[in-house]
Amino acid sequence: MEAKVRSKINGVSKLKGNEIDKASGRAFEWWGPSPEAARSIMVNKSKALKDKRANLRAAVNKYIADGVTIGIGGFVNTRVPVAIVHEIIRKGAQDISLCFQSNSICAELLAGAMLLYPEHLSIKRVELAWWGYEVIGIAPLLRQLASSGTIQFDDYTNYGMAARFKAAAMGLEFLPVRDHGGSDMEQVNRGKMMASPFTGKNTYLVPACYPHVGILHVTAADKYGNCRIFGPHCTCPEIAMAATHSIVTAEQIISNACIRTFPNLTEIPYTAVDAVIEQPLGAYPGICYGYYWFDMAHIQLFRRAADELRKSGNPDPLKKYYEEFIFGCETADDFLNKIPPDTLAKIKQLDGNQPVIVN
Amino acid sequence: MVQYSAVEMIAYTGSRVLKDNKTVFVGTGLPMIAAMHAQLTHAPALGMIFEAGALSPRLDGGMPLSVGDTRACQKSCYLKGLGAVFELTQRGHADYAFIGGAQIDMYGNVNSTFEGGNYAEPRTRFPGSGGAGAMAANCEKTIIIMVLEKRRFVDKLDFLTSIGFGDGSPDYREKAGVLGSGPYRVITHEALFGFDEKNRRMTLLEVAPGKRPEQIQEKVSFALQVSADLREMKAPGEKDLRLLREACDPEGYFLARKVK
């Protein structure tokens, strides 16, 4: 076997051989489709400007199946696709893989579903950079799932995950990046250190991440799926372009004439979108710039129930949350109708009326 | 004498190490507060970078509670996504990074992935790298905020998440393929550390008023180097505390917290 190019991490690392997947010589495997398979799916799709407005349940039923890899848009509490995640939990799926950068409530909601209803929903593995709530605290269900060793993790930095989605959006197998090298992520994740063919210098390569399904919440979209994003883009454009199919909820549907008036503002083109659903407050209790701030009290309500399961093993408060806010609802609007109107008015006011261009 | 808390000392020291006319890549909490205080005092032209995609926003909407918070983006000069701001770090646009973690070693390497057990089945799984691993690699200078405790200042990390000087060898970072110059300061409420230019080891630069270097060594597992020019940490004055409490974190999300 050829001599491996590496940093000097071996001299510092405490990890043992059996912890280091790559040391065991496991062959590289795409967790989603290969670049060729992803391209083939795209080539065979209709590129017609057709009306892709859909019912959220129908879209989830169509694209979410056992074993799929799901790319989750947004960042921590920002523009997180909560309405879509609720629908995925209502549907249920086995052995799904998740890929995201930094996420809070979407990842925790799926983890909680797995802990409470393992026969209904299960997560096989997670490719990520970060899983937590920032100011609100650590993610209790991540901690519980990780310590039981039931799901496989593949750790990157936030830039690493951005570059991985970007590589897939570009139709590549990998991208070179300036991080991960010299850290234990070089030992455990699926990237590789290589010598640059130009200078011979060590360069870390991260494998592209092609999800089967991208789930995203955006500011606005037209009925064909052209999307506008105000506020931070997070990595939503890259995830939509990387995925073989994308389900998008939008705060509002806008006209195609408006899209064509400012084509520079389109962050995701219609060819990358398969289903678009107008869902105001689709990121609630997360943030959507220009529309609402996050509802800390609601996130804490869910997190407290999750923490009780982790700390005392009592699943009842968490079950009550799922029964009331997910399984007790037919649609995202049913969920939102359970939130007091003055709470919704307050989070809208806390946005501070950020300017967005939607007409 | 003005009364200040441990957390206020950390925020004030964080502000003090930032120079004007630079940019700082900040995380949620004390890094943001430190940078806000610096902008309000000695560094009005300091720019902040937030990893969800913003460069130099105006924080007049209040302290952001997340790096993707609307408040971290409003009235920014440049607002894209994660890829764009991390590419700024690779290209040399980010002068400082503020990171934190659960464990640090003598070469400024930091763990924020797990503690105990092993990678596949950790006793305590932490959130993970997030931006920290990329910031420590490619912002020019890394500033690390830590709680000064023996279990955190360790001989060997359970997992090396954010690169420092690795094993201390001169070419460690070059062989890692990263571009930033590496760890610059470690801030705790009782001591400020830097790194020796020759051997890259953590070096005690300043101790809190009333503390002796031996008391700091007691809270660190590895042997500390002590600067020949050891100084006393500057305590926040009345005006600094007013700014921290009234302008930076008026609701006390972070400043009201206690340090063990």
Image (cartoon, coloured by chain):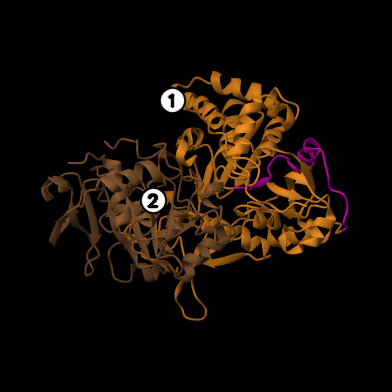
Chain colours: A orange, B brown
Compared to A61, does B37 lie above or below? below
Q: Is residue A1 visible?
A: no
Residue sitting at x 47%, y 81%: A199
Q: Residue A39 location, x and y as percent?
A: 75, 61
**Which numbered disc, 1 or 2, marks the residue closer to the eye?**
2
Residue sitting at x 40%, y 67%: B176
| Residue A268 left/right relative to A152 | right
Q: What element does badge 2 sit on?
A: helix
Q: Is residue A189 visible?
A: yes
Q: Residue A37 location, x and y as percent?
A: 74, 58
Residue sitting at x 66%, y 52%: A32
| Residue B111 left/right relative to A222 | left
Task: Pick whichever, A32 or B224, lies toward us.
Answer: B224
Q: Is residue A68 magenta?
A: yes
| Residue A108 left/right relative to A291 | left
**Tags 1 and 2 touching, CB below 8 Å:** no
Badge 1 amino acid = Lys
Q: Quadrant of residue A353?
A: top right
Badge 2 amino acid = Pro
Compared to A330, does A24 lie above or below? below
Q: Quadrant of residue A66?
A: top right
For label 1, count other residues whose C-alpha is less than 10 Å away and answer few (under 14), some (14-19) or many (20+).
few
Task: Pick whichever, A188 or A259, lies toward us.
Answer: A259
Q: Which residue is mark 1?
A: A311
Task: Pick whichever, A332 or A88, lies toward us.
Answer: A332
Q: What element does badge 1 sit on?
A: helix
Q: Residue A148 location, x and y as percent?
A: 47, 34
Q: Residue B155 location, x and y as percent?
A: 25, 51
Task: Pick whichever, A332 or B122, lies toward us.
Answer: A332
Residue range in magenta is A48-74
Q: Which residue is mark 2?
A: B31
Q: Label 2 marks which chain's residue?
A: B
